[in-house]
């Protein structure tokens, strides 16, 4: 959805034509896979981070266009809400001191953006959901100006045929309706990309799905929605409900939501693209002039425009991506599980843990997806979203005995997954200093039982106990969060409290 989309409206023939083009794209993808046309192994990774804009008072600022004008860098772009920005980090090859280099690039970029935002009485906050956002902030007037966002909003609501219902049962209950998809903009995340060969794709995607629950348990950073304390990581339920094209009747029939964990382990990247075409009607049936099959017949590489556009309107937590550089196609796994923040160090620690763990699990001769049911993986994701670092996870027992056990996520990480992540980083040829420092951050998070969500809720409740009302406590928590975020020490070291 990052590309420009221009259209004035769609009719029935547009959707039928688009469906035909999607099927041609699928046939083209199948040919590319069969003919082994994809890029060689390159060990490339990339990072995108979605950001919030807030003022000195901790409240959101609807200023992304003027802030972007001041930043004046193609590395930064708009996101759905006027209080959002996104920064894209150039691809890096996994190896050596890559994580330290990434950390320095991100600190430099976000620091520069923060200074420019300060000139407009705002600042950058890297967090899963800004605690001070209210339902009144998430209205159509605060949708970013880009045409594709208004078009997406119109198409989702037209498909649904009624207002969106937001209903999240957590520590407290959030229940409200929305006339727009703008509540989706509250959800700000980190996307971790990994370029893979077709032969490796299924193993990497399956591994990423298997560890999604653990990622959330460690990294949860979004406990508040519209002032309510709900799940420890509230982005997934909020995002699913804010993009849900299904009426309650279709939900009751079991129709799949567009924000989707999935339902099975896969054997090929093709499986995921084919499911996307088979299960989900087009939201933005904009066709390009390219004929993908004729392009292949000429010995050229098709861009598969329709397939990529459609893929961008289906929000898998681990998304397949087809891309091309200099006429050479490639595949990526885009891990969209993690919230933004709390600090650059925390973001890089989460990334190091993910890339190392996925490498080890994808290489394992006894794959975890052969020993863990997909239903357990999905239940792990749900439990981690609800309970964060206190969640329990289902996981295959170590050794040859077989079976699956339930244990605290932090114990699973400390006893089994951290050593696997370290071995995976060694396989990527990461420098031991980088490996030990960033995995050490994950270890201390587990030992202290602290992540962004736990710090936010503990600080918020302390602020309430001091006599502040709820809005004031949320604003004070946000201001203190931003101060500590800018200081840059990992969240497990942060003192609880607003002072």
Image (spheres, grey):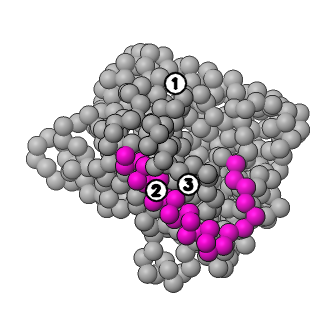
> What mark, if any, has residue 227 been given in the picture?
none
Residue drawn at x 26%, y 34% is 363
**Which region shows up in magenta?**
4-31
Can you give x and y, in whole percent of width and height, for residue 125 in the image?
A: 71, 41
The secondary structure that most of the magenta stretch takes on is helix
Whichever of labels 1 and 3 marks the residue nearer the N terminus, that label is 1
Whichever of labels 2 and 3 marks the residue nearer the N terminus, that label is 2
Looking at this view, name the residue that lies furthest to the right.
120
Mark whose residue sits in front, 1 or 3: 3
Instruction: Name the image quarter holding the C terminus.
Output: top right
SS under mark 3: helix
> Is residue 354 found inside the magenta-colored segment of the image?
no
Residue drawn at x 43%, y 81% is 253
Residue ID for mark 1? 92
Residue ID for mark 3? 306
Can you give x and y, in whole percent of width and height, for residue 411 in the image?
A: 33, 42
Q: Nearer the viewer, residue 294 or 46?
A: 294
SS under mark 1: strand
> For mark 3, does the 10 Å Cα neighbourhood hold few (<14), some (14 to 19), or many (20 or more) residues?
many
> What mark, if any, has residue 24 been given in the picture?
2
């Amino acid at each position: 959805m990052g590309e420009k989309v221009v259209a004035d409206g769609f009719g029935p023939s547009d959707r039928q034509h688009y469906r035909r083009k999607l099927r041609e794209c699928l046939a083209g993808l199948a040919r590319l896979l069969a003919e082994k046309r994809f890029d060689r192994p390159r060990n490339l990774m990339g990072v995108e981070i979605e950001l919030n804009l807030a003022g000195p008072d901790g409240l959101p600022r609807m200023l992304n266009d003027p802030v972007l004008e001041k930043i004046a860098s193609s590395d930064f772009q708009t996101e759905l809400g006027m209080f959002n920005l996104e920064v894209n980090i150039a691809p890096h090859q996994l190896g050596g001191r890559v994580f330290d280099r990434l950390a320095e690039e991100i600190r430099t970029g976000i620091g520069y953006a923060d200074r420019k935002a300060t000139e407009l009485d705002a600042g950058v906050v890297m967090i899963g959901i800004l605690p001070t956002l209210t339902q009144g902030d998430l209205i159509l007037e605060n949708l970013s100006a880009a045409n594709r966002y208004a078009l997406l909003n119109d198409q989702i609501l037209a498909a649904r045929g009624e207002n969106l219902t937001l209903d999240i049962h957590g520590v407290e209950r959030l229940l409200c309706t929305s006339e727009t998809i703008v509540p989706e903009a509250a959800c700000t995340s980190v996307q971790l990309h990994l370029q893979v060969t077709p032969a490796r794709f299924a193993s990497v995607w399956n591994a990423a799905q298997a560890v999604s629950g653990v990622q959330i348990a460690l990294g949860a950073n979004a406990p508040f929605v519209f002032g309510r304390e709900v799940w420890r990581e509230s982005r997934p339920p909020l995002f699913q409900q804010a993009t849900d094209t299904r009426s309650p009747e279709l939900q009751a029939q079991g129709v799949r939501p567009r924000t989707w964990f999935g339902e099975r382990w896969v054997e090929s990247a093709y499986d995921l693209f084919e499911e996307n075409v088979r299960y989900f009607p087009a939201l933005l049936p904009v066709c390009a002039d390219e004929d993908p099959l004729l392009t292949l017949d000429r010995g050229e590489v098709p861009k598969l425009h329709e397939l990529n556009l459609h893929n961008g309107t289906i929000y898998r937590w681990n998304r397949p991506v087809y891309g091309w550089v200099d006429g050479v196609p490639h595949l990526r796994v885009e891990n969209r599980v993690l919230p933004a923040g709390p600090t650059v160090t925390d973001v890089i620690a989460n990334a190091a843990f993910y890339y190392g763990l996925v490498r080890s699990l994808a290489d394992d001769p006894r794959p975890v997806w052969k020993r863990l049911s997909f239903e357990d993986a999905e239940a792990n994701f749900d439990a981690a979203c609800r309970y964060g670092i206190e969640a329990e996870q289902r996981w295959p027992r170590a050794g040859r005995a077989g079976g699956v056990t339930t244990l605290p996520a932090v114990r699973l990480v400390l006893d089994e997954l951290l050593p696997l992540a370290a071995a995976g980083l060694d396989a990527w040829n990461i420098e031991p200093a980088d490996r030990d420092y960033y995995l050490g951050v994950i270890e201390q998070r587990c030992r202290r039982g602290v992540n962004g969500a736990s710090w936010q809720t503990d600080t918020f409740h302390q602020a309430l106990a001091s006599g502040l009302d709820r809005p004031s406590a949320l604003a004070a928590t946000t201001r203190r969060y931003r101060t500590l975020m800018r200081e840059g020490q990992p969240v497990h070291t942060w003192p609880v409290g607003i002072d």
